[in-house]
Amino acid sequence: MVRWTTYGAVTGAVVLVGLALGLSLPLVSLRLDQWGYGQFAIGVMAAMPAIGVLLGARLTHAFAARCGTPRSLQASLLLSAASVAGLALWPDYGLWLALRLLLGISLTVVFVLGESWINQLASDAWRGRLVALYGTAFSLSQLCGPLLLSVLGTAGDRAFWLAAALLVLGCLLLLGRDGAPEVGRHAAGAGGLLGFCRGQPAIAWAVVLFAAFDVLVLTLLPVYLLHEGIAQASALRMLGALVLGNALLQLPLGLLADRLPRAALFRTCGLLLLISSLSLPLLLHSALVWLLLPLLGASAGGLYTLALVLVGARYRDDALVRANAHIALLWGVGCLLGPLSSGAASQWLSGHGLPLLLAGGAALFLALAARRGAFELRGDPR
């Protein structure tokens, strides 16, 4: 039996994180662009949370074992709120690097434990739909972020303060909730991440690829569109269209994941991501771009949704938290490599480096997905 009230509270808390990120991440990049920083410097700033992810993923298990899943989530949300507020208080590139690192650490704990909690609550018959519903709500919150930012404007710090308030509200939603994964105090075995990647390389790369896509969309895509001659207001609306496509198609995808072979759905998402990424430079100034952007967002988001469904179907409690911690580490790798490689490629190789790198990542996913038994979950996540 699904605890619907708890599911709604946990999903709501993570959704508020998405809205806060949708508000603050584009504003950081646009503010740096206004200050005269190049795309590589903006990419370095965008990559800082990824280093925090790598640190936070290794701390999550010990933190949850000591404090419990609910309290760990609440403390991390409050720390995230303080980090975002600091962006408004100290407008300095060096300090922002440190604050973004702290934000990456705290939000990693939120996502690892929040997604583990949601998967723990879901019955297997409903897993695809409940995970997809979470993904849809999170994507819609990210959509509302840039749209709300276009209303608030980028000149002041109101968006930073609103984002911090939303994170505090997410903390309050978790008061008195139960059904969280029980985390043991014993240490994880060495080499767990490598074993996880060897056991399911296509799933591991899908997480890396979507992580790179997610951070690139919220940080460098607005800058890419501005440099291609798109007005700032239109660039933010185009970003919204991409996130909307991800949101609208996650629920149908979750329904299909409960009824059809998930490997075929995975490969279809990868193929659509490859096609849409290659088409973006060609259709950027065409009316067809408004159809292409939702497809791009939906195909990328489907990779992550299906990865969570497959992992949640296999693991429970402590093992589920460990598996999601490995996913968070892979997410950190994607967040780190995506902005740095795209920023460097866009500045020194091609102005269309962002969509071309996404296409290359999709091609690699399809190659891994073509291997025999690519989506069989094997081995202990420890």
Image: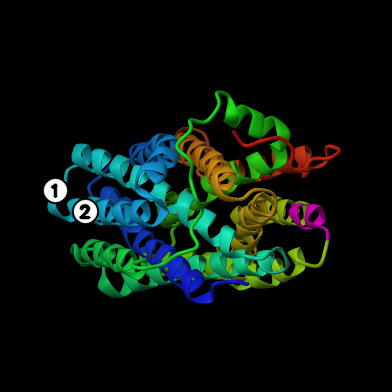
The residue at the point 43 percent across, 71 percent down is: 9
Above or below: residue 237 compared with residue 28? below
Q: Position of residue 196 (x, y in %)?
A: 65, 34
Instruction: Report whether 206 appears left or right of 339.
Output: right
Tell me how the rendering is colored.
rainbow
Q: Which residue is mark 1?
A: 90
Q: Farthest residue to the top: give it.
A: 190
Give left or right: position of 297 versus 150: right
| Front-lying residue, 40 or 113 | 113
Instruction: For mark 2, give the secondary structure.
Output: helix
Evaluate whether residue 108 shows in this view.
yes
Residue 82, numbered label: 2
Q: Nearer the viewer, residue 71 or 275?
A: 71
Q: Nearer the viewer, residue 268 or 195?
A: 195
Task: Check residue 263 for magenta coloring.
Answer: yes
The boundaries of the magenta stretch are: 261-266
Left or right of 88 in this view: 292: right
Q: Quadrant of residue 256?
A: bottom right
The CA distance from mark 1 to mark 2 is 12 Å
**Nearer the viewer's eye, disc 1 or disc 2?**
2
Amino acid found under the numbered disc labelled 2: Ala
**Which residue is painted at 43% across and 55% down in the image?**
218
Q: What residue occupies the far left of the structure in this picture?
A: 89
> Relative to residue 208, is residue 126 depicted above or below?
below
Q: Residue 131 at what x, y percent from top left?
A: 60, 64
Q: Residues within 10 Å of mark 2 (few under 14, many from 20)?
A: some
